[in-house]
Amino acid sequence: MAEPYFVYMLASKRNGTLYVGVTNDLSRRVGEHKSGAVPGFTRQYRVDRLVYVEGYSSILEARARERSLKRWRRDWKIQLIEKDNPNWNDLTDWL
């Protein structure tokens, strides 16, 4: 069974502004970020490139991981992204 909850990171560009979020519908949520449908941080700073995703079977696990990542230092987040996505490709096409 596929993981129904996702922790994800968006970036404005390579080494740009980062955003960490959690959702149960990754395709829909990334679409909202890309279209600017929801006012807030990602629309204001044009953070819409999906660069990192983790799947979880429990919303509690996903939210705990989101909170943990939000407290991480920026360079740790960059290392995590570059481990799996060294070119900072937009992963939206893989959804």
Image: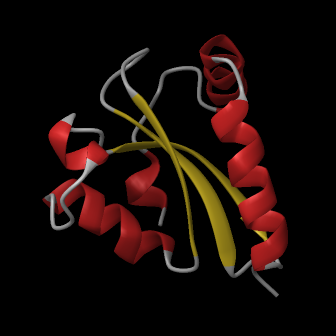
Which residue appears at 64% of the width and 38% of the height?
A: 70
Figure check: 19 above or below 6:
above
Which residue appears at 77% of the width and 42% of the height?
A: 68
Figure check: 45 above or below 61:
above
**As rendered, which of 68 and 53 lies closer to the eye?**
68
Q: Quadrant of residue 86?
A: top right
Q: State how the image is colored.
A: secondary structure
Which residue appears at 36% of the width and 62% of the height?
A: 30
Which quadrant is home to the N terminus?
A: bottom right
Which residue appears at 57% of the width and 52% of the height?
A: 8
Q: Quadrant of residue 36?
A: bottom left
Q: Is residue 56 left or right of residue 13?
A: right
Residue occupying the far bottom of the picture: 1
Residue 48 horizontal/vertical position (percent): 30, 45
Figure check: 87 above or below 35:
above
Residue 32 horizontal/vertical position (percent): 26, 67
